[in-house]
Image (tube, helix red, strand yellow):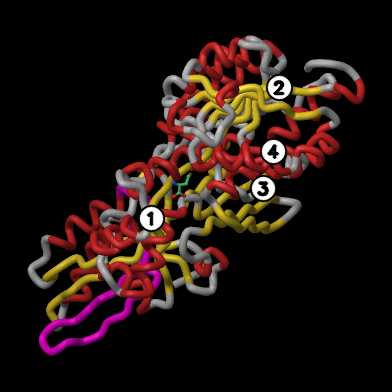
Amino acid sequence: MNGEGDSASVKVALLGYGTVGTEVARLLHEHAADFTARAGASIELAGVAVRRPDKHPDVPAELLTSDATALVESDVDIVVEMIGGIEPARTLLLNALRAGKSVVTANKALLAEHGAELFAAADTSGADLYFEAAVAGAIPLLRPLRESLAGDRITRVMGIVNGTTNYILSAMDSTGAGYSETLEEASRLGYAEADPTADVDGFDAASKAAILASLAFHTRVSAADVHREGISEVSSSDIAAAKALDRTVKLLAICERVNGAEGGEAVSVRVHPVMLPRRHPLSSVDGAFNAVYVEAEAAGQLMFYGQGAGGAPTASAVLGDLIAVARNRVAGGRGPRESAYAALPVRPFAETCTRYHISLDVADRAGVLSQVAAAFAAHDVSIAAVRQRGRNQDASLVVVTHAATDAALRSTVDEIAKLDAVHEVVSVMRVEGGEP
Ligand code: HSE
């Protein structure tokens, strides 16, 4: 903090000046008077660290630097990190926190992989570490989990936290097109990155799931604890099979409080495609939007919805954090610390029980259904519903199961695939929300 009383100011360093950084700087400038009134101190942009200062003629030259380390070490009070990735962001933020500078970051991968050491550094120096923009962009979600629901017991957090994959799945649902051509179209329209791996393979959603589970259950969950499946295996047959059951396919991050070993509690954290009933609130979340559904013992069901990415929406979350952190500095205190006291174990995915939808092409003759049913019974997977539709000599057979472990289901499908009467296992997908 620089100065006293009305002349107090907080100096801010921006690390990174991409889509989000540009919007943060623009809004800081445009709403300077309001932000000063809200924070109780003027928020002064002290420097912007970028890789190539010559590429940013819109930023006053005296603010630009390519030396992020020196900017963090200068007399700034708050460091706002929008570089992304692990290094150099990790080292820069650790240095800032160790020096007592508060940090606002949108870096989900860094928090999900190195959250423990960042929180420890913040605790040691008494600095703030805020990261609302790291999950679901503009949607106020982390502060409700960390603060508003601190008096409740959250049992489940389930959401669409990746806009790219939601855009692709929504488009596949409405056009009937396959995954590859829809991804190509999404890239052409700018909805998917040139390298879409982090999004389509579920890494981005897994980092966000780790952050959500940590906050919701007061425990520490890292990216490596999250079971992750992306959407590249979702076919137009899967989408059609879901449609036939009045369901839609979504990539969900699911964080649950579950029974652990020896009667204790554990958490299950996973990201994978699921079939959801069309009447489920998450089914109507289309395109690049995000939505997160929270279940808490006292509050009941809550839903958070909005834009999960983009310059201005993400800047809204960054600036909310920046003002909160500035207020804390003006008050001479800090915001909530990490709450990981529950130290819950993470249940292995193979032990996680979910329901499955299995679609088969089979020969339409006596005894086939009983062979298929016998394979389910042999692996202790209970069938909840069976639908059959005949097609000349063949039939399409859809089986929806009760909850079973992933291990049991995999063994069942392997056995079914070997039956002479089964021409093809068309689709295997997990099912959430409501009975079949
Ligand atoms: N790439 C993310 C998405 C946005 O597609 O939702 C940033 O987290």
Residue drawn where x is 50% and y is 55% of the image = 160
Amino acid identity at mark 4: His
Q: Mark 4 vs mark 1: which is more N-terminal?
A: 4
Query: SS of the residue at dot 3?
Result: loop
* CA neighbours of label 1 inside 10 A, class few (<14), some (14 to 19), many (20+): few
Q: Is residue 333 magenta?
A: no
Question: Looking at mark 4, is its residue's CB closer than 8 Å to ligand 1?
Answer: no
- Bounds of the magenta segment: 381-407
- Tell me which secondary structure the magenta stretch mostly adopts: strand
Residue drawn where x is 67% and y is 57% of the image = 302
Residue 222 can be seen, yes or no: no
In the rendered structure, are the residues bearing label 1 and label 2 in contact, judged by CB atoms less than 8 Å apart?
Answer: no
Query: Of circles 2 and 3, which is in front?
Result: 2
Quote the CA–CA distance across marks 4 and 1: 28 Å
Residue drawn where x is 48% and y is 71% of the image = 277
Query: SS of the residue at dot 4?
Result: helix
Q: Which mark, by number, is residue 409?
A: none
Q: Mark 4 points at which residue?
A: 29
* CA neighbours of label 3 inside 10 A, class few (<14), some (14 to 19), many (20+): some
Q: Which mark, by number, is residue 190?
A: 1
Residue 86 to residue 95: above or below: below
Quote the CA–CA distance across marks 1 and 2: 35 Å
Q: Mark 2 points at which residue?
A: 11
Quote the CA–CA distance across marks 2 and 4: 14 Å
| Image x and y of residue 19, in percent | 50, 42
Query: Of circles 3 and 1, which is in front?
Result: 1
Query: Of circles 2 and 4, which is in front?
Result: 4
Q: Mark 3 vs mark 1: which is more N-terminal?
A: 3
Q: Name the residue under label 3.
A: 140
